[in-house]
Amino acid sequence: MSARLTRPNIQLNEHGKLKHFLTLEGLKPHHLTEILDTAESFLNPHTNEIKKVPLLRGKTIMNLFFEPSTRTRTTFEIAEKRLSADVMNLNISASATKKGESLLDTMWNLEAMQADMFVIRHSESGAAHFFAEHVAPHVHVLNAGDGQHAHPTQAMLDMFTIRKLKGDVFDLKVAIVGDILHSRVARSQIQALSLLEAREIRVIGPKTLIPPFPEALGVHVFHDMEAGLEGVDVVIMLRLQNERMQGALLPSEQEYFDLYGLTERRLAYAKPDAIVMHPGPINRGVEIDSAVADGPQSVILQQVTYGIAVRMAVMSIIMSNAALLAQSQGEAIDSSDTEEKAATQERPE
Amino acid sequence: MKIVIQNGRIIDPSQNLDRTANLYIARGHIVGIDTPPEGFEPNQTIDAQGKWILPGLVDMQARLGEPGHNQTGHIASETKAAVAGGITSLCCPPDTDPVTDTQAVAELIQRRARQAATAFVMPIGALTQGLKGERLSEMYALKQGGCVALSQANQPIQNPLILKNALEYAASHNLLVLLRSENQQLKNHGVAHSGAVSTRLGLPSIPASAETTALARDLILVEEAGVRAHFSQISCARSVEMIQQAKQRGLPVTCDVAIHQLFLTEMDLLDFSSLLHVSPPLRSQADRDALRMGVKTGVIDAIVSDHTPLGRDEKQLPFGESQPGISGLETLLALTLKLVDEKVLSLSQAIQLLTEHPANILGLNCGSLQTGSSADLVIVDPEDYWTLTSDSMLSEGKNSPFIGWEFNGQVEMTLFQGRPVYLANAV
């Protein structure tokens, strides 16, 4: 008999609660709704006036960006500061690993500086899992984008935006347009939409930008933009990287815009109240027309605002789960101590 | 030294032999089965009641760390690991440092192997200088230097004209060529099979066509050159079909599969464990099933370990940044016997794929218990269950995804040239 070892979900603690936040795959819908509900409380009007809450006071969060990013890093940093955490930003690609230090040595050194949470962005798919596997038990890992794999906080802020503006994700038809193949955002969005039971998830793009096995994602594939947008409630546009032209995946930006660019005329195929989203930064005239990006159906800037609340929610949930776990373990130790003392007392001298 | 091994079940497909008998060894050779030669007085008697006696296994692909990669193994350590797995003859590919593209490197490997005196090590020479795929190596000199075949290891020649010339030159000297078919442009820096799992995990992917288009090209050039070609480590269902068709057309081709491809699939990558990063990548369930059918029906001629010992630093990295490879010497036999338990192969077929067939492909007098051949053999206890652990591995590379697996059939003793070189209880 072979004994192939099955590992438990690395991102959940022994009570099935979030310990790390690496991907949405393998999570339950209640994990997502907890994040969305908690984020709602961070949008509360009076927390908007006094922006800081003391939930993570005394905790140290290190933002480890092995891949450059301004927008994501900034929103994480704002979220961390609003939770009153001590924040360190490390641009790792320009420091330790360039001097030959191994990834794990870098991480262990930072851990020795008593970090409580690492927010990691890395160009390799699975890098956040790798860190989560090797960190000390009290350290938490939050994935801020790994390779082409996952960008779970981005997907959660997208779900939050949809819920705010459409009331619920359930039963909606959502189209994701563009480079699905290379997009960690799209993968996480698709997982979130499936967990929250969207009625239909469509991906639209040329075959060169669609993953080789789309049925594994549970999506409907469209190569024709008009057909794909027909009757959808939400249109999510993805950023097109310039290198897709050099890699011979597309003939030109112009032809891409002609076929898959979101214009007012094309948007008319969606439902009249459909919303338009984009993870940013947008390429005007490449994937989206300015008239749509700045138009009444665009919710792109709201996504950015909600992103901070969602990231605050994720971090506060993880840290409160850790506190609850430590408390329950402490109680277990206390009660076993008490039992032992009781037994000792009963023992005749 | 004269040894008699008594009452073991002798299984040697090369002689169509499977019966309980005594086996007699003298001066490092097998001198008789059933009946001893006249005047045979043994110095040692080994009781093999209830055990199997098999020819020492022949592994066509095992990296031994030397020269150049000594931090994760050397010939002495890796040949010890080999005999612990029942392997007494092994070929090492030319992707050493320096590359095995000169007689001197080939001789160095054999000299180190002779010093270790644990197993028979056969270097494979590089087809092109430095494995760069640009200039032909001195193939005839490599043959003179003891290379049993030529290959490009995992760096296939991309330029078809250079490959054509290399195959024709090898054919002129009746040299065996080992080809690993892979199109680097279609591979496109991928690290996982292009399928459901890479789609879900966003791992840069390698389509099956990276192997099959290259295999189609290679088969046509092999046919034109009339060279004896062996295709290494095929991994796709379509490749099995293509080799089958080539054999039906009468081409002098054979092929092998790495043992891990017969057990693991892309589905095993779901937690990004870099221990499962291999080249070619773990393919789909359908591919794995076709490969199993390939070994069952005889389209695939041999099973290899593709042993690649790697250190922690090379594996403790995110999946795509880690080095591909599995430390496989110690699980080659155990996993192949598992295919017998799972009714994929008969016991005789399993042994044949690890002994007679690879020996025949290489044109070598090993992998057999015929009277007169070198006494390289394995005694296996078929009733002994064991679990692979990192501590129990003798290879310097502990990079095995099979750690924690339970196996049936323990190598109890291995003899090389009539000398016991491994004894299970002694470790």
Image (cartoon, coloured by chain):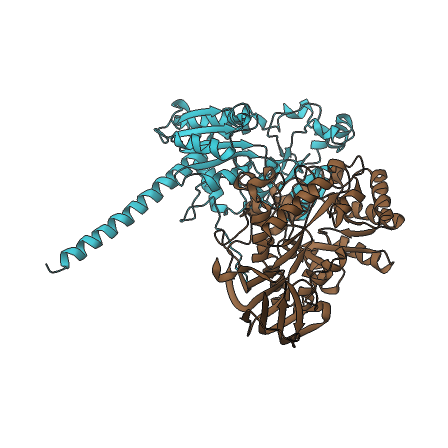
Residue toward you, A43 or B328 = B328
Q: Is residue B201 left or right of residue B352?
A: left
Q: Is residue B4 above or below residue A139?
A: below
Q: Is residue A77 above or below residue B124?
A: above
Position in image of residue B410 (x %, y %): 54, 64
Q: Is residue B70 above or below residue A48?
A: below
Residue A326 lies, in percent from the top left, at 33, 43
| Observer-nearest of A4 and A240 | A4
Estimate the x, y position of residue B223 in percent, counting from the top left: 87, 50
Could you say which chain is coloured brown in the image? B
Query: The chain drawn cyan is chain what?
Result: A
* B140 or A103: nearer the viewer: B140
The residue at 65%/41% (across/down) is B191
Quadrant containing the N terminus of chain B in the rendered view: bottom right
Viewer-proximal residue, A5 or A321? A5
Find residue B138 and report its horizontal and vertical position in percent. 79, 40
Q: Residue furthest front?
A: B39
Asked if one can make out residue B342 in the rendered structure from this viewpoint, the answer is yes
**Residue A1 visible in this rendered orientation of the protein:** no
- Considering every residue shown, the one lying at the far right of the view is B224
- Res A177 → quadrant: top right
